[in-house]
Each structure stands twice: as structure tokens, then as C-alpha cells.
Amino acid sequence: MHYQTKKKIGRYIGIMLAFVILSYTAFEMKDFARGPQIVIDYPANGATVNAGLISIKGTADHVSSIQVNGGDLFTDTLGHFKKDILLSPGYNVIEVRARDKFGRQIERKLELVAEANSPHAPVAGLPTSIRSY
């Protein structure tokens, strides 16, 4: 082979290698650029609820850990989470925090008002044999 041909092949290989490295770097940086995301699907922020026990449902993307009111929580493979929370009558604040693999953190606060149940009314979601006193 001629020297010029070897030189051209070396350039093409170098350009392809640089393209592969830059593409991989851009692919890995998308998670860093986006950061952790939390979407709370239910209940709506500021909602008034009748029950003492409710389920917080939502989705978390690009997270390595998630907590609800300081307790660890797990997500399914699609990032969905569900946590049952017992509310006190009146104003309640629920904190959902997530951290990504780069250490960045996001927090969502859910503010709810729970209407006081009568002393002998069943708590929503529990069997009628278990009552709130």
C-alpha cells in the first residue's frame, strides 16, 4: 500500500473513533442534564380528602433512591411508585424526595387537607373490622 492510502485509512479510523466516543458521551450525559424527575399522579396537591388512609401514586425518572416522608420507597421497572399514608385530621404535608446517581436531589411537597372522620367510621381502604377511634 502506498503511504498516502495508509494515511487516509488512519484518518477515517480516527474520525470514526472520535464520533463513537462523542456519541457515547452525549448518550451518558442526557441523564445528567435532565436530573431526577418526580410526578405525583394522585392525589392532587391541595386536595381535600375524606379518608384517613390514602395512597400516594406517582412516577420517578432518573432516580437511584426515593423517599416519602423520610422512609425509603421502591419503584417498579417503569418508575411507578405507590405509598399508603395515614393522614391526621386537618392539614398534612407529605414530602417526596428523590436522588439520582450523580447525587442531585429533587423534592416535591404534597399538601392535603383530611376531613375529620367520626370516631367510629371505618378508615378508607381498611376492612370494616378495623376502626379508627
Image (tube, grey):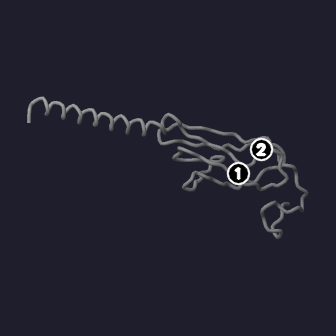
- Tag on residue 126? none
Please tell me whether mark 2 sits on a helix, a strand or a loop: strand
Q: Residue at x 79, y 41 (%)?
A: 46
Please tell me whether mark 1 sits on a helix, a strand or a loop: strand
User: Which quarter of the image is occupied by the C terminus?
Assistant: bottom right
Q: Going by the image, does 41 lie left or right of 122?
A: left
- Tag on residue 56? 1
| Percent coordinates x, y for residue 10 in the rendering | 18, 33
| Percent coordinates x, y for residue 70 in the rendering | 63, 47
Question: Of label 2 and label 1, which has the lower sequence position?
Answer: 1
- The answer to which of 12 and 110 lies nearer the viewer is 12
| Percent coordinates x, y for residue 32 in the rendering | 48, 36
The residue to which callout 2 is attached is 92
- The answer to which of 69 and 84 lies nearer the viewer is 84
Question: Can you say whether 11 is above or below 126 in the image?
Answer: above
- Mark 2: give few (<14), some (14-19) or many (20+) Cα within 10 Å: some
Q: Going by the image, does 14 lie left or right of 37?
A: left
User: Which quarter of the image is occupied by the N terminus?
Assistant: top left
Q: Amino acid at mark 1?
A: Ile
Question: Can you say whether 16 is above or below 89 in the image?
Answer: above
Q: Residue at x 62, y 48 (%)?
A: 59
Q: Residue at x 82, y 70 (%)?
A: 129
In which quadrant of the rendered view does residue 22 lie?
Answer: top left
| Percent coordinates x, y for residue 110 in the rendering | 72, 42
